[in-house]
Image (tube, rainbow, N blue to C red):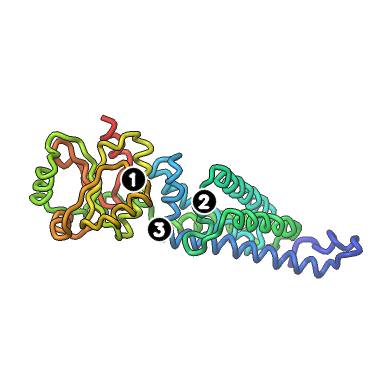
Amino acid sequence: MRQGIYQRHFDNMPFFNGKIMFRLAAIIKLFSAVVFIISAIMKLVSMDAFELYLYSFGIFSLDFTMIAARLLIAAELFLGSLLLLGIYSKFAVNTSIIMLFGFTGFITYLLIVNNHEHCHCFGDLVVLSHPLSIIKNLLLVGMLVIARKTSDWIIRFRTVILATLLITSIALVFIISPPDCLRRDYYKSKTTYNEQKLNEFIQDQNLQDKKKVAFFFGASCHYCKLTAQKLAVFLDKAHNENNFMIVFMGDNETANQKFLQEYKLEKVNYTYLNPMDFLKITNGSLPLVFILDKGEVVETYGYRSLREKSVLDFVAQ
């Protein structure tokens, strides 16, 4: 049973039928709920790409971005669930409209600064151009304005359900995709390398009296590409590319140059090793990052254990 009669909003208007508008508004609200939930799920499925997209702007630290990305997904899931269940509808609709205007303002900014990378509103699974994303957001706002007039379901324990949905939305996102910053010790314990072979590389490259953060990449490696996006932000924040170096697996100059250009790493010094020597150093694990202080290994990281603060503090010394 619903609280109030929706038709009263339209019965006095000659061009509207209250029952039809009631059903239309209910369908629109359900559709909006499904869009929010699908958007949250698609971001969650491609979490690595989504959080790196947010991090690429260099506004927040890597750890904060990991948490913020998941809270944003949880917010979409929470609002979608409220709209789907038909409780606290005005709060859900108003908050959703504010969020959509915020997204639209952000996309408009991207257009102004000529940033054409898609905004990941549906993760990496559906790619929309900026104009299409703006149109999509404005259509959703229009639909939510109509859905705003619907009434809530009369159910008991609404406050308890609200709190449960909020906690569940956050917990679900963090359980399905735990942020790397909360599990670094676990990932770090899995990172190994061949000390003897690494020392041979350090001597061959004359790194005994230098400070370097060495990134061991394979040009076709998926997680190397993701780590390269982190490295690009590190460079922007450090304002010093001299203490960074890239070591490629193999001497495919075309692939290596394409890798550097794609992730805007052309200013970083790079070298390469034949695949056999490379894999001996890394024990077959890619990517691998070494903080080297005059030939001594200070820290070793993989993709998920990489710590922004340690890298930036080291190159700033």
Q: Are marks 2 and 3 in contact (CB under 8 Å)?
A: no
Kindly report the distance in space between the C-alpha atoms of the residues bearing marks 2 and 1.
19 Å
Q: Quadrant of the N terminus?
A: bottom right
Reading the image, the residue beneath label 2 is 116
Q: Which SS class for mark 3?
A: loop
Callout 3: few (<14), some (14-19), or many (20+) C-alpha neighbours within 10 Å? some
Counting the numbered discs, the total is: 3
Kindly report the distance in space between the C-alpha atoms of the residues bearing marks 1 and 3.
29 Å
Where is residue 32? Give x, y as percent.
64, 62
Q: Which mark sits nearer the N-terminus, 2 or 1?
A: 2
6 in relation to 111, above or below: below
Q: Which SS class for mark 1?
A: loop
Instruction: Check residue 265 in the rendering and tell me which mark sits there, or answer none.
Output: 1
34 in relation to 120, above or below: below
Where is residue 289? Give x, y as percent.
24, 48
Q: Quadrant of residue 251?
A: bottom left
Q: Is residue 67 visible?
A: yes
Q: Which mark sits nearer the N-terminus, 2 or 3?
A: 2
